[in-house]
Structures are given as C-alpha cells and as structure tokens.
Amino acid sequence: MSKFTRFVVDDIRFPTSTDFDGSDAMNPDPDYSAAYVRIETDAEDGLTGHGFVFTIGRGNDVQCAAIAALQPWIVGRDVEEALADLGGVWRELVHDSQLRWLGPDKGVIHMAIGAVVNALWDLRAKREGVPLWLLLARLSPEQLVDLVDFRYLSDALTREQALDILRAAEPHREERIAALQRDGYPGYTTTPGWLGYSDEKLARLSREAVADGFTQIKLKVGADLQEDIRRLSIAREVVGPDIRIAIDANQRWDRDEAIAWIRELSRFDLAWVEEPTSPDDILAHAAIAEAIAPVPVATGEHGMNRVLFKQLLQAKALGVLQIDATRVAGVNENIAILLLAAKFGVPVCPHAGGVGLCELVQHLAMFDGIAVSGTTDGRMIEYVAHLHEHFAEPVEFVDAHYRAPKLPGSGAEMLAASIAEYRR
Ligand SMILES: C[C@H](O)[C@@H](O)CC(=O)C(=O)O
C-alpha cells in the first residue's frame, strides 16, 4: 500500500529560437511553454508520474495555478487503488461539483484535470513496465469502456456500441502491434510551413521534407491572401503534384470569409483545411465543410471536450479529426473521442504542433491503430522538429514514420536538466 505524497508544478517556458519560428495567423510570436506536474509517492520503486499542458508564454501562469489547485484531490490517496480505477478517478475529478462549476468540461480547469489524469497514466504505465500505447492496446474491450464516461454521448455512442467497435478490432491486435513495431506510424510535417519563414527557407524546408520521405506537408495561412497564394505557389512548385499540402488557418476566418478564401487557394490541390474558424462553431464548420467539399475540414486541437467532438461528427462538420493530448481531460476523454471517430468512420490525424505533443499523442494514435479503428489508412500524426531534446524519451522519427516508443510511461517526462534550465 502506498500513498501519493507530493505534487510539484513547474512553469516551464522555452523562448522562441532564431532558427525555429512557430508563428501562425493568430499566434505571431509564440513562446512554447508547459504547465508541468510531477506526482510522487512513498512507494519504494521511486517512480513518478508526469503530465503537462502545452500553453504559450504568460498563459502558463494561469494553467499552472489551475493544476496546483488540484493537489488536494490527489495527495494522500492510495496509489494502487487510484491506478487500478482510472475511470473512477476521471469521473470523480470531472464530475466534482466544485471543479465542474468552473467549466463544465472546458477551459483551464479541464486541461488541468487532463494533466493530472495523464500523470497518473504515466505512473501506471511505468509501474507496469510498458509504454502507454501498449498498456492501452492490451486492455480488454470491457476495461476500455470502463474508462469512458458515456454521459452526454449516448445519443451517438453507447457503451454497447463502443464494445462492438473494440471487439471488432480485438482479433488482430497482436499482428498490428508487430506491424507497428516493424514499420512505425506515418507522420506529416509542419516544419516548412510557419508564417515567419522567408521564401528561401520555405522552399528549402519543403524540399528537405520530400527528401526525408514525407508525403504531406502543412502550411500556415490566413494572415494575407496574396501571401498565401505566393507561399503555396512556392511550396507546390518545390514538392511537385504528388505530395499532399494541407493548410491551417488557426481559427482566423469568419464562416463566409473562410469559404471565399479557401476557394482562392483550392487551385493548389489541398489535402485539408484546418481550423478555418472558431473551434466552438459547429454550424460554421458544417457550412464550410459543405462548401469546400471534397476538400475535408480538419479540426480538434482546440476542441474543448467529447461533447463538442460528438456534435462536429453528427453535423458532418469535419472530415479529419485532430485529437490533442493536453487539451481535453486526459487519456480517458481522448479514448472517448477515438471511439466516436471510429463510430462515424472519420480518420484521426492528431495535432502535435507544440512542446511535447509529439511525445504524448503518438501513444494515443498507436493505440487507435491497434485497438479502436484498427487501421492507419488515411491517418498520420503531425510532426514538428523542435524541442524533443528536453524529453526523457524523445520521439524517434525515421523515414517519415514515428517509431513505437519503447520505454515505460506516457512520454511526458522531461529531463531534470531541462526543467532546471527553463523553469520560471
Ligand atoms: C502556436 C502553435 O505553434 C500552433 O500553430 C500549432 C498548430 O496549430 C499546429 O501545429 O497545427
């Protein structure tokens, strides 16, 4: 029997480097930051659980305060009991009437719960000696549905339907695990596409992406139409007709502006149009999706909770669903969203532009490919080539594929030296 004894929150900020830009139409100068939590126990194994929320600059103060406020919910409780029932812990935190009042199910408090839930999953995977993706991929369908809260979802997805999805994928799980360990999971890159890069850098990085084996790149758009046309002309010229180019407006447009702007850019043969408008505006997304078909709308990195994803799917408002490992309330809620996507037959291509998001979200995509959708067809994880060196198990990326993580845990643990150097 052991207890949770310490709960340490660190405000970690990585200033934008001269080499890496990271700017988009709504975030001109982002300082990538992490509101980072480490949970300790009095167990002899000395293992710790790590989780974080990706934020930008001073917003990290607010997020750290929200995570710190959750300490009384964790410290002092029994470790084995909590880790054996992470569905119960999730429900307790998300349905707590005092925390719920601050949402419900949205904003900094919801993301704070996500960081804590993810830290508990990190600890559980370390205790079981396996990477998180493998731990999840070997849970039974019954254990997986017990992690999910079907309240507010049952008009689109019931527990029984979720069980059917998971049972359908169950027979070939071990073959898919072997294939993942052999081949990796496909990725696409946003590295060439940040708004602040010169034409020369855009062309060079796009050329390098193709040489590195990528079949898709992503360009930020939405600040200026003529600039977008110029930058897309350069990228298309460099990569040729066979490489997919996705665009990402980071919520810049109103509905009708989005439709008109995208029509101007459609000559560049777009793979998808990401975050065209407010992430909460389901009807505008549906109208945009209808107007720009067959080019799919992609969204989700700012999706606040499972209910929003349910409605986006019900309204046919997205064609590519982008989960984010630190936006909703942790692993459990992302399992619910993966199940919803499978129910509606929509591919999941996770968001990973930020610090540590590649490290975390790869586990969820790999789990999806093995045990939920059971496929990687039409699916890719975003890849961005920066800040990986701060993590205990940085992503391993070979021939445009994520290699399956091998170390026990969720990938969230940062190196002590990096925390010491970048902590405020
Ligand atoms: C501010 C972040 O860099 C954001 O632009 C990332 C993002 O939207 C993406 O990678 O997609």
Image: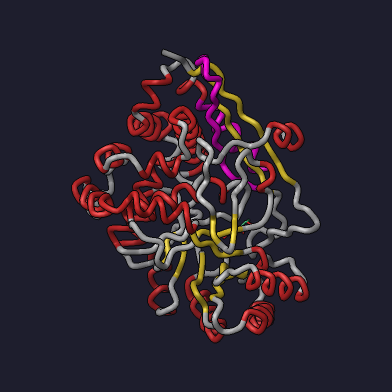
The quadrant where ligand 1 appears is bottom right
Whether residue 37 is visible, yes or no, is yes
Position in image of residue 330 (x %, y %): 45, 41
Colouring: secondary structure
Q: Residue 343 falls in which quadrant of the image?
A: bottom left
Tell me if residue 307 can be seen.
no
- The tally of labels here is 0
Q: Is residue 257 above or below residue 94?
A: below
Quadrant of res 316: bottom left
Image position, residue 102 (x, y; %): 45, 36
User: Which residue lies most toward the bottom here?
Assistant: 267
Q: Which residues are magenta?
A: 41-70
Q: Nearer the viewer, residue 49 or 89?
A: 49
Quadrant in which residue 208 is drawn = bottom right
Q: Residue at the spot x=71%, y=49% of the render?
A: 31
Image-based side of 187 in relation to 15, left or right: left
Figure quadrant of the C terminus: top right
Near-viewer residue (5 or 1):
1
Q: Is residue 62 above or below residue 153?
A: above
